[in-house]
Image: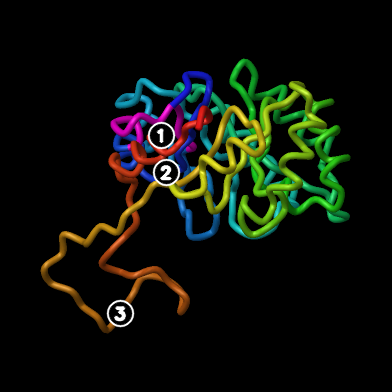
Amino acid sequence: MPDELIFEVCVDSVESAIAAQAGGAHRVELCDNLVEGGTTPSAGTIAMARKHLDIGIQVIIRPRGGDFCYSDVEFEIMKYDIERAKQLGADGVVIGLLNPDGTIDVERTRELVDLARPMNVTFHRAFDMTRDPHQALEDLISLGIDRVLTSGQEISVLEGLDLIIELVKQADGRIIIMPGGGITERNVNKIVQASGVTEFHATSTVSAESAMNYRNTRVFMGGELRPPEYSRLVTDAGRVKSFLDAVDIES
């Protein structure tokens, strides 16, 4: 894989972060609760990830699942979590705030960016919920955001590829466009070649069975729509490596 291409792996545990590094990832986005698209991980998770990783750690700052229109209390939580992530050695944070009308919440985003520095800042897929992606991109550029994670406002990057290509041209080096959402080993090379992006974001998971021998199947920990109680998705170093092996922009 070309040296200038960066692979960010989305993980939800320290063990998965370690596996991502072992597979050759350049950076991880550290999250909790990926069932809801990722929420802020615990202080312990951030600290232990920093202890065990040499690669970059981007910490998602998202106080809950759902939309990206936050209350004053939620905004205070986000500010606290950014300060904590900085203290614990994170390299960057991942944020996303919108107004009710589907525009970027410029004022509060600016406050978070200023608070985060000198860490780098990614604007996550809240971007995909904006009403005008081209104006949203200009707003993020004006705020000094380092990169934006996007599926091209579609369910996956392949469906949103045309918009991603447009955004890369519009950005013209002023901000990094990082595609993410539905990228696999089979399509990553096509996406990179077609868009000319220099970074991409994906999960690289396999299913891992629980170590529990005794299993009470009468109860479960969560709502009616739930992940399996005795298996979970974990990052696999081999899958990370297969992504890197799949990218060949010379072909």
Magenta-drawn stretch contains 23: yes
Q: Quadrant of the N terminus?
A: top left
The residue labelled by disc 3 is 219
Tag nearer the camera, 2 or 3: 2
Question: Which x, y percent locates residue 231?
Answer: 28, 64
Which residue ends up furthest to the bottom in the rendered image? 218
* Res 173 quadrant in image: top right
Amino acid type assigned to the residue bearing label 1 in the image:
Leu
Compare residues 206 and 47 and report the one nearer the observer.
206
Question: Which x, y percent locates residue 77?
Answer: 62, 41
The residue labelled by disc 2 is 11
Secondary structure beneath dot 2 equals: strand
Amino acid type assigned to the residue bearing label 3 in the image:
Val
Which circle's residue, 2 or 3, is located before the other in the chain?
2
Q: CA distance from mark 3 to mark 1?
A: 41 Å
Q: Which region is colored magenta?
A: 20-29
Compare residues 108 and 171 and report the one nearer the observer.
171
Query: Residue drawn 36% across and 20% down?
Result: 54
Which circle's residue, 3 or 1, is located before the other in the chain?
3
